[in-house]
């Protein structure tokens, strides 16, 4: 049995790539490094982190990392998974703008120099790191997941105070807080697991997931409301429920092979192997020398100072 959730603590989990992509495309590169290296993603990510600390006052914070952005266990199940994002001719390299790619190592080095845990897991995406850490802390402390990716709505759980700060529409400063009421209002599903079931049937072109032909968001949500879950819908089809008929039945039957494997692709892992390290906010800089070198090399003293102040280290 889980212990009562501690309300004086909060874990904030950053979907780091989601945030640095947003920073890259949303922050003008008006202040490149002295050598001309772009810095907008670095500056944006550090400022976002400071904003989130000021807004949510976490006691624990993790920058979750994609050690594998397109894991084999997902592509073996559904080969089209994220295939449209591959560099042409490459079996595993994600298409990332050169001006962003050069900044990613700097982002990681800066976060680590601050002492903010940067956690990935071989063979897993950042989503799986987030799912694993959320699972470990369910009932221990409230969790806020910061992302622009709707896939992580599956983790929403009012009972354990697990919410998503959704950045896709309003950015970090005014990120929408997604709880079960928001899921009900926006998607007509009652919980995080119900959202996952709906999204499996609906599909997601941005991730290369085909879904079930002819079943969109509203129809999927209505089926889940009627039958309780994706498993319930499939059982009703198997049992010949007369309420599921015509083209809808035919399409659900035709999608059996997809529905067999899609949950293993869509649902985040809860057991990714993670380095064992403290997740609490740093009380001192982990590597002041590296942080100073980053300031001097890239000319980003402003964002560094703002994050120092948010962490109460400066």
Image (tube, rainbow, N blue to C red):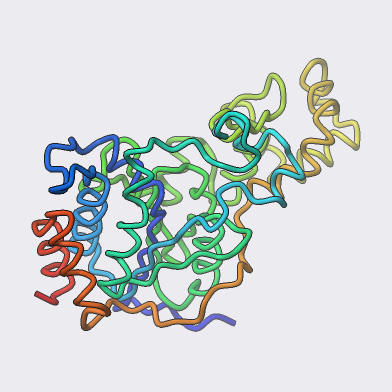
x, y percent for residue 78? 73, 39
Q: Is residue 43 visible?
A: yes
Query: Residue pushed farthest front?
Result: 35
* Residue 32 lies in quadrant: top left
> What's the residue at 50%, 66% (across, down)?
134
x, y percent for residue 206? 53, 31
> What's the residue at 69%, 47% (across, down)?
74
Left or right: 216 as drawn, with respect to 97:
right
Left or right: 195 as drawn, with respect to 79:
left
Left or right: 107 as drawn, with respect to 205:
left
Query: Residue pushed farthest right?
Result: 239
* Residue 28 lies in quadrant: top left
x, y percent for residue 307? 17, 64
In this rendering, the answer to whether 138 lies above or below 86 is below
x, y percent for residue 144? 37, 61
Q: How many labels sit on residues? A: 0
In this rendering, the answer to whether 14 lies above or below 266 is below
Left or right: 146 as drawn, with respect to 91:
left
> What's the residue at 33%, 49% (across, down)?
177
* Residue 56 lies in quadrant: bottom left
Q: Quadrant of the N terminus?
A: bottom right
In this rendering, the answer to whether 144 lies above or below 19 is below
Closer to the camera, 224 or 103? 103
Q: Is residue 222 visible?
A: no
Query: Residue pushed farthest top?
Result: 247
> What's the residue at 20%, 69% (across, down)?
291
Q: Quadrant of the C terminus?
A: bottom left
């Amino acid at each position: 049995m889980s212990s009562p959730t501690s309300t004086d603590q909060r874990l904030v989990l950053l979907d780091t790539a989601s945030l640095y992509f947003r920073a890259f495309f949303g922050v003008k590169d008006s202040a490149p490094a002295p050598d001309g290296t772009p810095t907008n993603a670095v500056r944006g990510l550090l400022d976002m982190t400071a904003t989130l600390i000021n807004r949510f006052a976490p006691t624990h914070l993790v920058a979750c990392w994609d050690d594998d952005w397109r894991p084999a266990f997902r592509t073996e199940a559904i080969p089209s998974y994220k295939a449209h994002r591959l560099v042409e001719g490459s079996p595993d390299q994600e298409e990332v703008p050169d001006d962003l790619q050069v900044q990613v190592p700097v982002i990681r080095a800066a976060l680590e120099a601050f002492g903010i845990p940067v956690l990935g897991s071989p063979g897993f995406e950042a989503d799986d790191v987030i799912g694993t850490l959320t699972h470990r802390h369910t009932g221990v402390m409230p969790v806020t997941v910061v992302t622009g990716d709707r896939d992580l709505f599956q983790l929403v759980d009012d009972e354990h105070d697990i919410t998503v700060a959704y950045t896709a529409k309003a950015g970090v400063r005014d990120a929408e807080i997604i709880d079960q009421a928001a899921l009900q209002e926006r998607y007509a599903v009652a919980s995080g697991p119900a959202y996952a079931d709906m999204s499996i049937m609906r599909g997601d072109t941005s991730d290369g997931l085909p879904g079930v032909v002819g079943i969109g968001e509203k129809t999927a949500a209505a089926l889940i409301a009627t039958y309780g879950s994706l498993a319930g819908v499939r059982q009703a089809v198997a049992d010949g429920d007369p309420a599921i008929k015509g083209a809808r039945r035919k399409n659900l039957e035709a999608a059996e092979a997809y529905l067999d494997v899609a949950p293993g692709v869509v649902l985040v892992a809860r057991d990714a192997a993670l380095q064992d390290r403290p997740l609490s906010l740093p009380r001192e800089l982990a590597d002041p020398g590296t942080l100073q070198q980053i300031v001097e090399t890239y000319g980003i003293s402003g964002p560094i100072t703002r994050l120092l102040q948010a962490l109460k280290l400066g």
